[in-house]
Structures are given as structure tokens and as C-alpha cells.
Amino acid sequence: MIQLKRIYDPPSPADGFRVLVDRLWPRGIKKEDAALDLWARDLAPSDALRKWFHHEVSNWEEFERRYRAELAEKPDAVAALRGQCAGRVTTLLFGARDETHNQAVVLKDVLETG
């Protein structure tokens, strides 16, 4: 089971395996307080895509298409994360305020359907 959560929400034992999926470290979060098991920065959107999207909902469909294309170019990294998530509760952590339109939503779908 893969769930999503903002990195700014407090860690919980129910989170299971905690994976940060942002390329940049979230502002205001101390590394020791993040309770991360993995920082999958290589699976985050490229800097160019992240800057282009700029969390504009009107860009969402194109962002999702482009991000899926980026992930398709990293099959080994996607497969490795899928393997690490297998058989346990996993929480993909993200910094975005918008809980519906962010890279974790797309990555979760790719991990679950691939």
C-alpha cells in the first residue's frame, strides 16, 4: 500500500517506509526531524520541469505527461523503488501545498500500475 503525505505533517508509525520524492530539501524541515527512510531525489521531476510547472493547476495535465515521460527514462530507478515498497506500507512525502496536483500523485500511480 502506498499513501501520500506532506513532509510538513508529523511522522507517524502508520507511515511505514517514508520516502521523500522532492528534488529539493523542504524549507524549514530539519533532516533529523523528517524521519526519512529514503530520499528519492533522482525520481523527482527535473529542475526544468519543476520550474515550468510552478504548481499551476492549469499546467497539470501537461506536467503529468512530461513527468511520466521522465520516469519512463529511468526504468531501473522506478523498479528499484517499486521493489523497496513491495509488501509494506509506504508513504511518499512531498512539500507541495496542493495535495492533488504534485509529483507524488503521479509517482504513486506509476509505482502501483507498472
Image (cartoon, rainbow, N blue to C red):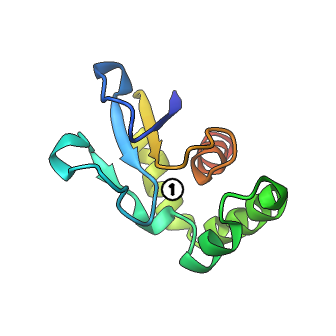
Residue at 68%, 65% in the rendered image? 67
Decide if residue 94 is in sight here: yes
Q: Residue at x 31, y 23 (%)?
A: 12
Would residue 86 be seen by someone viewing this image from the given angle?
no
Give the percent coordinates (x, y) of residue 74. Answer: 56, 70
| Residue 46 image position (x, y, % from top left) | 56, 74
- Residue 9 coordinates in the image, percent (x, y): 39, 32
Q: Is residue 109 left or right of residue 6?
A: right
Residue 40 x %, y %: 40, 58
Residue at the extreme left of the image, as rendered: 32
In the picture shown, does residue 23 fall above or below 46? above
Q: Is residue 74 left or right of residue 81?
A: right
Numbered-mark total: 1
Q: Could you classify mark 1 by the number of other residues whose Cα lies within 10 Å: few (under 14), some (14-19), or many (20 or more)?
A: few
Residue that extends furthest to the bottom in the rendered view of this protein = 48
Q: What residue is drawn where x is 47% and y is 49%?
A: 95
Q: Find the residue positioned furthest to the top.
A: 14
In the image, residue 49 sits, relative to residue 13, either above or below, namely below
Write down the residue under mark 1.
79
Q: Secondary structure at mark 1?
A: helix
Judging depth in this view, the residue of 95 and 39 nearest the camera is: 95
Query: Depth check: 13 or 55 in front?
Result: 55
Question: Would residue 55 appear left or right of 14 to someone viewing this image?
Answer: right
Which residue is at the front of the view, 27 or 86? Answer: 27
In the rendered view, would you say 108 is above or below 43?
A: above
Question: For residue 13, which quarter of the picture?
Answer: top left
Amino acid type, callout 1: Ala
- 80 over 104 or under it: above or below: below
